[in-house]
Amino acid sequence: MANFNTHLAVGAVAAGLGATMTMAAGVVPQNQLLTLTMAGIIGSVLPDIDLEKATPSRMLFSGLGVVFAFIVLFQFKKEYSIAELWAVWIGVYVFVGYGVFAIFHCRTKHRGIFHSILAGAFFAALTATIFDQAFNEDPVVAWFAGLFVFGGYIVHLVLDEIYSVDFEGHTIKRSFGSALKLIEHRSMRATMAMTAAFLIVAIAAPSSERFFSIVSAPNVYSFLQKRMLPEDRWFEMKTEPVEKPPVETEANMLPQLAPMTPPENSANGQMQ
């Protein structure tokens, strides 16, 4: 399988390209592009969350500890003192970062259910839910963050499959087919548990109607047709024509006189 640095580098490039396309489409505020890029990078190392002694797992559980600590903290920000809030934050962080970490690795094995497309969908819905309920983001932004996590997740699985092929020796390693799969065929219990978890977060997630209308196939196809390649030459700067002000001459600088009309009384006298 690909190592951590490879997953991180390829995930960063893929997330950056996705953020560039999102910026060109103008579907999310520009100040969210870095957040979406980070979501994609995190997604690109998430499948290795079940590696107990690996750097990604330790980092991810520490990150989840921070996220959930703030989620809980927000619920008590007005009721508790600063000292009590400190205790709550540290308690949740230690529980998730160390307690849940230990329990999780007792129940999972590498390249199990977390190396599946179903797990990627779960993390995408979970990301959208966190962005909506914890950070109060717009549903479109929340689902785009979920999309970036899912995209990074798929990039990781594809890379692992590519590294399962020995191109020099023209052989396929025994690990081939264990990374990129829809569900975990070897454990239906794990598959059922992940399906249930996905349904729970999908129900709690924000409305996805506007998001899916944006990323619908006709809209994406029309956008790529217009913006994917330059219309003329590459890197040619487009400038809008500037309207020149009218040139002032002596003629048009003269005051404009109103047309003269005969006085009303003189006109009546002539008629009489």
Image (spheres, rainbow, N blue to C red):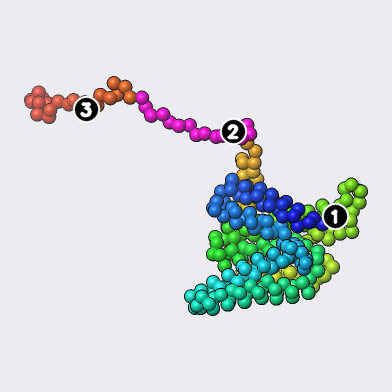
**Closer-to-camera residue (53/126):** 53
Which is more N-terminal, label 2 or label 1? 1
Q: Residues within 10 Å of mark 2 (few under 14, many from 20)?
A: few
Q: Mark 1 belongs to which amino acid?
A: Ser
Q: Residues within 10 Å of mark 1 (few under 14, many from 20)?
A: many
Q: Is residue 109 left or right of residue 12?
A: right
Residue 64 percent across, percent down from the top left: 65, 68
At 57% from the left and 51% from the top, the residue drawn is 27
Is there a contact, CB below 8 Å, between mark 3 and mark 1? Answer: no
Residue 214 percent across, percent down from the top left: 60, 52
Which is more N-terminal, label 2 or label 3? 2
**Residue 164, numbered circle:** 1
**Position above or below: 214 against 230:** below
Q: Nearer the viewer, mark 3 or mark 1?
A: 1
| Cα–Cα gap, marks 3 and 2 | 51 Å
- Number of numbered discs on residues: 3
Residue 12 percent across, percent down from the top left: 68, 52
| Cα–Cα gap, marks 1 and 2 | 42 Å
Residue 141 location, quadrant: bottom right
Q: Mark 3 belongs to which amino acid?
A: Ala
**Magenta stretch, residue numbers:** 232-247
**Position above or below: 167 against 62:** above
Q: Secondary structure at mark 3?
A: loop
- Locate the C terminus and report the quarter of the image it occupies: top left
Which is more N-terminal, label 1 or label 3? 1
**Position above or below: 246 against 71:** above
Q: Is residue 245 magenta?
A: yes
Q: Nearer the viewer, mark 3 or mark 2?
A: 2
Residue of label 3: 258
Q: Secondary structure at mark 1?
A: loop
Residue 242 location, quadrant: top left
Q: Is residue 49 magenta?
A: no
